[in-house]
Amino acid sequence: MTIRKRSALIIALVAVGLGLYGAARQYSPLLVFHVVEQSLIQKAPSGPDGDVLRERFHQFISAAPDKHSRMDRLLRVSAYLEKVQHPTVQQLNELLAVDEPNQL
């Protein structure tokens, strides 16, 4: 293999690696959002409707001012759902409270 072919191969591998890194960086918050949302819906008590809970969750996350705050909220909900396997409606209301307490 000549030095030119080696260089082209190395450049191609670096380009693929950078592309994968960029894609992972772009889509990982969406993946975390989806997983936390599905986990919240699955662990919710049978009382609240799934669509209402999903809407409350979207409002709670979108109320954060920036991407970092949204990720902090996602991680906080995820950590809470790990500790509490079957949250009550009141616990969900407290968890997803934005500014004013909304009822499910």
Image (spheres, rainbow, N blue to C red):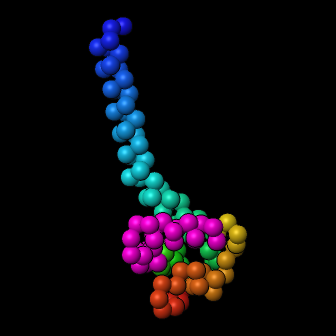
Q: Where is residue 64 in the image (x, y as percent from the top left)?
A: 42, 76
Q: Residue at x 58, y 70 (%)?
A: 76
Determine whether 10 is above or below 74 in the image.
above
Q: Which residue is drawn at 59% across and 85% down?
A: 94
* Secondary structure mainly formed by the magenta segment: helix
Q: Is residue 33 magenta?
A: no
Q: Where is residue 10 in the image (x, y as percent from the top left)?
A: 37, 23
Q: Which residue is drawn at 57% across and 85% down?
A: 93
Q: Position of residue 21 (x, y in %)?
A: 41, 43
* The furthest residue to the top: 1
Q: 66 or 30: which is nearer to us?
A: 66
* The furthest residue to the front: 3
Of the 4 image quadrants, the one containing the N terminus is top left
Q: 90 or 21: which is nearer to us?
A: 21
Residue 28 horizontal side relative to residue 45, left or right: left
Q: Is residue 71 magenta?
A: yes
Residue 8 horizontal side relative to residue 35, left or right: left
What stretch of residues is rendered in magenta? 58-80
